[in-house]
Image: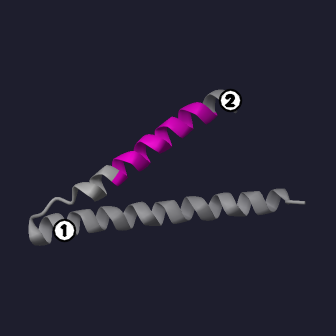
């Protein structure tokens, strides 16, 4: 049986991993832009997809929760 503490721990770990991933991706995006003058569209698209997913999840979970 899965304990509530396990679910809470997994939720916090996922949030932390997502935040670190976003910070690193933004860093890579700006480093490529500033160092080489190249805009990495793939990183920008992934960042936008993550932002849209977060906003949609907040709206959906806000209605149902």
Residue pointed to by mark 2: 64
Identified at 55% across, 64% down, the residue is: 16
Element type at mark 2: helix
Residue ID at (9%, 65%): 37
Q: Is the magenta stretch mostly helix, strand or loop?
A: helix
Percent x, y of residue 12: 64, 60
Instruction: Name above or below for residue 43 compared with residue 52.
Output: below
Classify residue 14 by image quadrant. Answer: bottom right
Q: Quadrant of the N terminus?
A: bottom right
Total numbered labels placed on residues in the image = 2
Q: Is residue 48 covered in magenta?
A: yes
Look at mark 1 in the image and give the residue it sits on.
32
Crowding around mark 2 (Cα neighbors within 10 Å: few <14, some 14 to 19, many 20+) is: few
Residue 32, how many percent across, how many down? 18, 68
How far apart marks 1 and 2 lie (CA) works out to: 40 Å
First in sequence: mark 1 or mark 2? 1
Boundaries of the magenta span = 46-61
Local crowd at mark 1 within 10 Å, few (<14), some, or many (≥20)? some
Q: Which of 12 and 43 is in front in this view?
A: 43
Tell me the residue at 82%/56% (across/down). 4
Q: Quadrant of the C terminus?
A: top right
Q: Splitting the image into 4 quarters, where does residue 23 fall?
A: bottom left
The residue furthest top is: 63
Question: Is label 1 in contact with label 2 (beta carbons under 8 Å)?
Answer: no
């Amino acid at each position: 049986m899965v304990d509530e503490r396990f679910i809470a721990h997994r939720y916090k770990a996922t949030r932390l991993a997502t935040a670190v991933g976003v910070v690193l991706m933004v860093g890579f995006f700006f480093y490529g832009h500033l160092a080489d003058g190249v805009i990495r569209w793939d990183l920008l698209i992934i960042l936008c997809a993550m932002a849209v997913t977060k906003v949609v999840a907040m709206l959906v979970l806000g209605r149902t929760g």
